[in-house]
Image: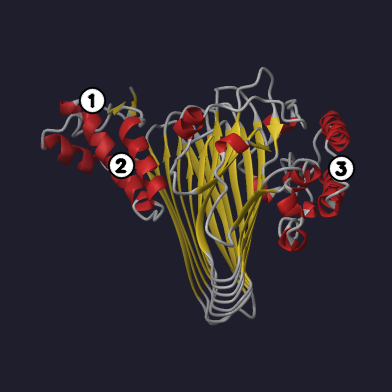
């Protein structure tokens, strides 16, 4: 069921900006991009943004009204002066050994990028002549994240211009970091990052996508990533989301896996005003497997939505989803999605789990893992939990001489470590460990009976 469109004024503003893009940066020399732009603006006119409050199950717990009701400016000419290298390195995980592409307000910043990589590995801007001549772009771009699949996908296609191409030929390997930076602008802006990742037969790729903001202002990031795995390919994908606290981020990833391929994705989401991580993985070839993991942390009135969907198309496939959330203040989180096992996908295995640590009485999480099974020879489980730090654990640590802040920090870090310790990309894992050591808010307890003698009743941000 199509969601209701946004207000006519909002649609008209996007249409006008689309015309401005077409005039400033025509895509006549890139016919595939030109076709996607036209298909995108046509689909967006039909679909609009998913603002409906009834019959809109996919967005039931996440309102996009703040996005639909705001005015965001799109700048097609990319006149923004790039930040300094030190400024970018302070915002995102960094390793000089990685092949790195940095995009500022949607445009490649060559002076901040280091695109050279292993022989055969393509890492280039979609607006480059190299990408325009690459047959993998014409074959795969827009095929998996088609404009007609939703309003945000349509809007991204309508403004398709620059972005990242990461492509590994058969048997190749490499690590690529895609950094999308939103600069501090005097008025709210919108950017539409795009990435196409193609892993050839028996190749092995590690890809980190980082989305970061330079200031504390409001802006809108509408990102789309397509990942295509050939037979036997292995892709280790990581998402680092650390936008401005006032930013809106809608990220959509579509993954198609061939026979005996393996896709593992770990996301870290550190709050924004409204953030959504929308993932659909299709296990097309027999023997394909995927592992989706995530850690999200919200405070204030931030909202994070992890919407995970896995479709077992073929037999002997496996999928696992494991997410953990840490919520404070009056923030909100959502975990939803569906694992579907098709009729022909016999001998498949699937698990879903979501665990949440609520550090204040005002924090809320809506969690809804679900299974849809049409095959009769499968193994599948799902579950979800949400609760406060157990009083007994707090009392035990206080009785051993730790103060409330240290005890709380140890317990929160221990809860998060199960996700962080599983990250194989060393630079990202080190960055997250430093973050938890230096940037975690300090808490104190007020309200637990046994802890009262040591410091008082409930947990809150100090």
Residue located 37% across and 44% down the image: 387
In the rendered image, the quadrant that contains the C terminus is top left
- Chain-order first, disc 3 or disc 1: 3
Q: CA distance from mark 1 to mark 2?
A: 22 Å
Between residue 115 and residue 274, name the one nearer to us: 115
Q: Quadrant of residue 450?
A: top left
What x and y, as percent, mark residue 157? 77, 47
Disc 2 secondary structure class? helix
Disc 1 residue crowd, few under 14, some 14–19, many 20+, Cα 10 Å? some
Disc 3 secondary structure class? helix
Q: Quadrant of residue 199?
A: bottom right
What x and y, as percent, mark residue 110? 62, 38
Asked if labels 2 and 1 touch by Cβ distance under 8 angstroms, the answer is no
Between residue 161 and residue 189, name the one nearer to us: 161
- The residue tagged 1 is 456
Residue located 28% across and 35% down the image: 409
Disc 1 secondary structure class? loop
For residue 413, which numbered disc appears in the image? Answer: 2
- The residue tagged 3 is 45
């Amino acid at each position: 069921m199509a969601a209701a469109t946004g207000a006519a004024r909002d649609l008209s503003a996007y249409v006008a900006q689309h015309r401005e893009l077409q005039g400033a940066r025509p895509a006549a020399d890139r016919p595939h991009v030109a076709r996607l732009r036209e298909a995108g603006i046509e689909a967006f006119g039909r679909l609009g943004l998913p603002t409906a409050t009834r019959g809109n199950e996919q967005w039931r717990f996440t309102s996009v009204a703040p996005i639909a009701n705001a005015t965001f400016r799109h700048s097609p000419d990319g006149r923004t002066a790039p930040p300094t290298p030190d400024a970018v390195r302070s915002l995102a995980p960094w390793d000089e050994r990685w092949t790195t592409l940095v995009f500022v307000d949607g445009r490649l910043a060559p002076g901040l990028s280091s695109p050279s990589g292993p022989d055969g590995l393509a890492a280039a801007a979609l607006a480059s002549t190299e990408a325009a001549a690459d047959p993998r772009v014409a074959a795969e771009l827009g095929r998996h994240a088609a404009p007609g699949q939703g309003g945000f996908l349509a809007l991204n296609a309508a403004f398709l211009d620059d972005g990242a191409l990461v492509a590994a030929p058969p048997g190749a390997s490499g690590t690529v970091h895609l950094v999308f930076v939103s600069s501090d602008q005097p008025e709210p802006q919108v950017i539409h990052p795009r990435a196409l990742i193609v892993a050839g037969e028996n190749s092995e790729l590690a890809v980190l996508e980082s989305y970061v903001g330079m200031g504390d202002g409001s802006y809108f990031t509408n990102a789309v990533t397509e990942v295509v795995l050939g037979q036997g390919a292995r892709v280790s994908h990581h998402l680092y989301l650390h936008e401005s606290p006032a930013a809106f981020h809608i990220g959509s990833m579509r993954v198609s896996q061939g026979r005996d391929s393996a896709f593992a994705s770990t996301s870290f989401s550190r709050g924004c005003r409204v953030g959504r991580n929308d993932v659909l993985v299709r296990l097309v070839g027999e023997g394909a497997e995927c592992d989706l993991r995530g850690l999200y942390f919200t405070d204030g009135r931030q909202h994070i939505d992890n919407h995970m969907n896995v479709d077992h198309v073929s037999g002997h496939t496996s999928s696992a989803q494991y997410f953990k959330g840490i919520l404070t203040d009056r923030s909100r989180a959502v975990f939803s999605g569906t694992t579907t096992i098709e009729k022909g996908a016999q001998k498949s295995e699937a698990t879903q789990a979501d665990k949440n640590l609520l550090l204040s009485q005002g924090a809320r999480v809506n969690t809804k893992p679900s299974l849809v099974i049409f095959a009769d020879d499968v193994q599948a489980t799902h579950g979800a939990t949400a609760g406060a730090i157990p009083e007994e654990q707090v009392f035990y640590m206080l009785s051993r001489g730790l103060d409330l802040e240290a005890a709380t920090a140890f317990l929160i870090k221990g809860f998060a470590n199960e996700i962080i310790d599983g990250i194989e990309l060393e630079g990202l894992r080190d960055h997250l460990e430093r973050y938890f050591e230096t940037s975690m808010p300090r808490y104190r307890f007020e309200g637990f009976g046994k802890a009262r003698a040591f410091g008082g009743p409930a947990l809150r941000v100090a």
